[in-house]
Amino acid sequence: MRTARNISLMLFLLFFILAVVGGLFIANMNFVKHVPGGTELIVPWKAMQNFMLQGVTPYGDLTKLNIQTSIYNQPILPGQYPYRVNTPLFLLVLFLPFAWIQDFTLARVIWLIFLELGLMGVVLLSLRLSHWKPHWLFFIFILLFGFFWQPTVTMFVTASPIILQALVLLAALRALELGSDELAGALAALSLLNIEATGLVFLVLIIWIFSTQRWRVLAGIGMTLTILIGLSFLLLPSWLLPFIGAVMENWRSGALPSTFATLQQWLPGIGNRLAQILAVAALTIGLLEWRAVRRQDVRWLFWTSCLTAALAPLFGIPYTPAWLAFTLPGVLLVASVMTQRWGILGLVTAIIVMAGIFLGLWAAQLNGLTSVFILFYPLSLTLLLYWVRWGAVRPPRLWADEIKLRG
């Protein structure tokens, strides 16, 4: 009887998963047909196709021209983003399965399914790392927020892999909680796909590893990177210098928004100096918190990682709105502390804060206010994270708090 029930349950789960994936496939196909985009998938997809089928380096001029023609329907014009391949070859090979798909529309549809499942994973892991079990109605609200706030929608349109990077980093933190250090290291190594967006959080993890002497995490990172880097040099021994050149060309283009470009446009006389001051202030905050997280538990590490993700645009790094999807765990951490520590008042406050972020970013998008994404939103999230810092980094001390967490 028990065996029959287990088989029935497994069949139900299988059909449920197939139904979900099938529904996502149909919805994504309709989305792709009506919404142009996928630029951040075109770059690795075309690069790996050229490399796999023609033996052409992903970082060369031919691949660059192919990508630019696919995106702009012509060679690049002055002031346009060059879309050079800025992913190291040892992680670019992860896109190989998609390069086998000749039809880009189909590749984009399947890629979107991975992004959507990744977003679900980010929400669930964020709640788990926050030690929070929200009411099912609020959980639905969180899912709707996560899927439809502006950075996520932009991520879906551009097909940015940023949410998958957030997923592996959160999974690494969860593995640390469970004591699976080698797995945590292997997952963390995969987060370097876009080092501009995730590199600082990876640095926080490295600092924490050395302070806690969790050397097996470092071993997991080292083994994973050694295997991937070794494979990349076997495939193309000369990839490193062209890769660095491609990254520098993207950065020098100045086509992506940054605090330096924004403040220079607002205040041509002192804008650059103000951006430098802002970057120094962000660095100072970061250094203080990176020092404070040493030898602390994963709860504290999670808060520091969320803060670092919020601070990243303030360093002056060229940053796209889609990359702000990387800050979703920070928003959920703020909401979790509010609801767990402040009761019904916290719940109402969390709803107001999340609604304000949702409406504010969409208003900025509709009015073309790029400054909100790379300046005002990061500042606001930083303040919110400091508002809940005490409750976020310390376990509950009162028996009432324990009951709330378990409930």
Image (spheres, grey):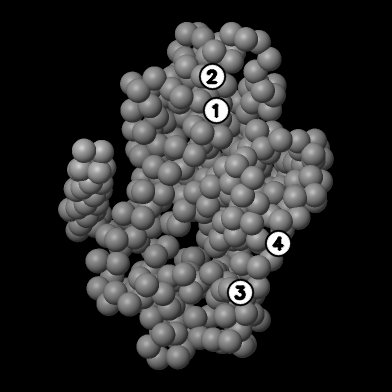
- How far apart, in angstroms, are the residues tagged by discs 4 and 1? 28 Å
Residue on which disc 3 sits:
227
> For the residue carrying disc 4, how many other residues have a C-alpha within 10 Å: few (<14), some (14-19), or many (20+)?
some
Q: Residues within 10 Å of mark 3 (few under 14, many from 20)?
A: few
Quick check: 356 left or right of 311? left
Task: Place residue 124 in its image quadrant.
Answer: top left
- Lateral position of residue 205 relative to residue 64, left or right: right
191 versus 332 height, above or below? below
The structure residue drawn at horizontal position 49% and vertical position 81%, both measured from the top left corner, is 58
Q: Is the C-beta separation of discs 1 and 2 under 8 Å?
A: yes
Q: How many marks?
A: 4
Q: Position of residue 199 (x, y in %)?
A: 65, 55
Q: Quadrant of residue 303?
A: top right
| Amino acid type assigned to the residue bearing label 1 in the image | His
Horizontal and vertical percent position of residue 347: 47, 14
> In the rendered image of this protein, does residue 347 appear above or below residue 214?
above
In terms of sequence position, does the residue under pointer 1 or pointer 3 come before the other?
1
Q: Is residue 355 left or right of residue 100?
A: right
Check the image and report above or below for 5 versus 68.
above
Q: Which of marks 3 and 2 precedes in the sequence?
A: 3
Q: Which mark is residue 219?
A: 4
Give the residue pinned by disc 2: 405
* Residue 183 as seen in the image, left or right of residue 364: right
C-alpha separation, residue under disc 2 versus residue under disc 4: 34 Å
